[in-house]
Amino acid sequence: MPSLSRPVPVARLHGPVEAAPAPQAAVVTPTPAAAENDARLPLIRLRALNKSFQTGTREVVALKDVSIDVREGEILGIIGRSGAGKSTLLRCINGLERPQGGEVLVDGTNVSRLNDAGLAALRQRIGMIFQHFNLLSSRTAFGNVALPLELAGHGRAEIEARVSELLELVGLADKHDSYPARLSGGQKQRVGIARALATAPRILLCDEATSALDPETTRQILALLGDINRKLGLTIVLITHEMAVVRDLCDRMVVLDQGRIVEQGPVAEVFARPQSEVTRSLLQDVLPDLPAALAKRLSPVAQPGSQPLLRVRFSGAAAGEPVIAELARRFDVPASILHGAIEIIKDMPVGVLILALPATTAQPLATLIDYLRERTTSVELIGHVLPAH
Ligand SMILES: Nc1ncnc2c1ncn2[C@@H]1O[C@H](COP(=O)(O)OP(=O)(O)OP(=O)(O)O)[C@@H](O)[C@H]1O
Ligand SMILES: [Mg+2]
């Protein structure tokens, strides 16, 4: 794969739009000194965003009091169910939606104060890719990637060099002249990525970029995004409804539900200690916990002969410790593992176990739970179950 660490210098890509007098836009491409001063500031700062849509007499709240910081060079995943407000949030970042309340700051620029020229300049610094690729069917791969450069007024020779470099970068050097109809889904998304990178943006927004792709192609596209992030230092904000995408690519994550943030933090931490019901339910896809057949037999209260069921989450060093064996040895409590799943996230093991304790134990249940709690990430008593006969 060719070097991406040598993108076309920003100065060469300044087209007439950015050269036009747009005072706010100037802040979007700061001088190196200003960038250095701001190194500790987040590149994208969303403050108390509120956005509603009026449909007929009904008001739909798409974003409610959303505050997020995105640091330079990180990959932030925003996950939520359909209608959670993910696309609206992403569109606020590049000014395609205007929130009714709150602030969007991109590299210190207040996006809602930008005029049209300022917005056009901002969007040159922010690339975007989509679920359905949004390629022009009448243009070849080359023509699609060239489009943003043509719009910015670059010369033919420069465009040809830059587009060739980009197509090579995304692994499509041999598809210059192919039309989208002749490309696979993964190849189309590669063209989408090359097009998004054409103006050498510092930020890439991805709206369900892999949702239309099969699992293997998804893995390849995520690997490409990770590669671009590392080589170019590109900041990526990615929205998805799949935990696997967050697990495979992101550094930090935000969980949105009905327009509100219900959880945020480093991916491994959220996987290890999910706080909200929505997160737990989304996690089921990658760290399945309670099998349905078991859930059906669960009772909230103990019954004669029933066994307490514990959900034990563990991460990092705790994953390697013989906690269950210790429980048996120390308290003479043989816990049975009814279900278990483990994932490696950024080299850290994160897992969940469903344990059934014996119906009667010498020690109170609370003592056993406390013992486990000290040695694992979290322990919940999820109910009581009668042994299956
Ligand atoms: N232009 C619009 N007009 C009216 N309502 C809208 C508009 N855009 C979004 N909404 C509503 O705002 C809410 C959030 O929509 P949004 O598209 O941001 O969700 P999402 O999380 O991206 O969902 P999905 O995963 O299905 O793409 C939804 O209830 C949606 O119907
Ligand atoms: Mg959406």
Image (spheres, helix red, strand yellow):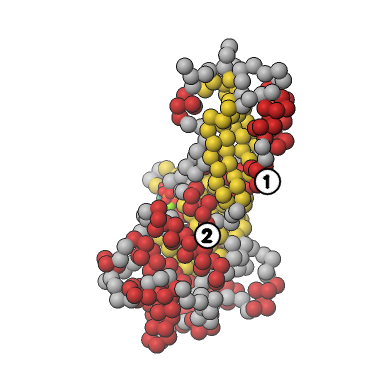
Indicate the position of residue 11 as horizontal and vertical percent values.
54, 83
For image coordinates 67% across by 40% down, the residue present is: 321
Indicate the position of residue 167 as horizontal and vertical percent values.
40, 74
| Rendering quarter of residue 29 | bottom right
Q: Nearer the viewer, mark 2 or mark 1?
A: 1
Judge whether residue 337 can be spotted in this image.
yes
**Residue pushed farthest top?**
304
Indicate the position of residue 347 as horizontal and vertical percent values.
60, 53
Which residue is identified by label 2? 237
- Crowd tier of the residue under label 2, counting other residues whose Cα lies within 10 Å: few below 14, some 14–19, many 20 or above: many
- Crowd tier of the residue under label 1, counting other residues whose Cα lies within 10 Å: few below 14, some 14–19, many 20 or above: few
Local secondary structure at mark 2: strand
Which residue is more in the foreground, 67 or 233?
A: 233
Which residue is identified by label 1? 317
Q: Amino acid at mark 1?
A: Ala
Indicate the position of residue 103 as horizontal and vertical percent values.
59, 59
Q: Amino acid at mark 2?
A: Val
Residue 137 — which label?
A: none
Judge whether residue 199 can be spotted in this image.
no
For image coordinates 61% across by 50% down, the residue present is: 348
For image coordinates 41% across by 71% down, the residue present is: 171
Cβ atoms at labels 2 and 1 below 8 Å apart = no
* Total numbered badges shown on the rendered structure: 2
Apparent side of residue 174 relative to residue 111 in the rendered image (left or right): left
Q: Which numbered disc flags the more N-terminal residue, 2 or 1?
A: 2
Which residue is more in the foreground, 67 or 99?
A: 67
Local secondary structure at mark 1: helix
For image coordinates 71% across by 18% down, the residue present is: 362
Whole-angstrom CA distance, mark 2 to mark 1, is 30 Å
Apparent side of residue 222 relative to residue 352 in the rendered image (left or right): left
Apparent side of residue 376 relative to residue 166 in the rendered image (left or right): right
Q: Is mark 2 within 8 Å of ligand 1?
A: no
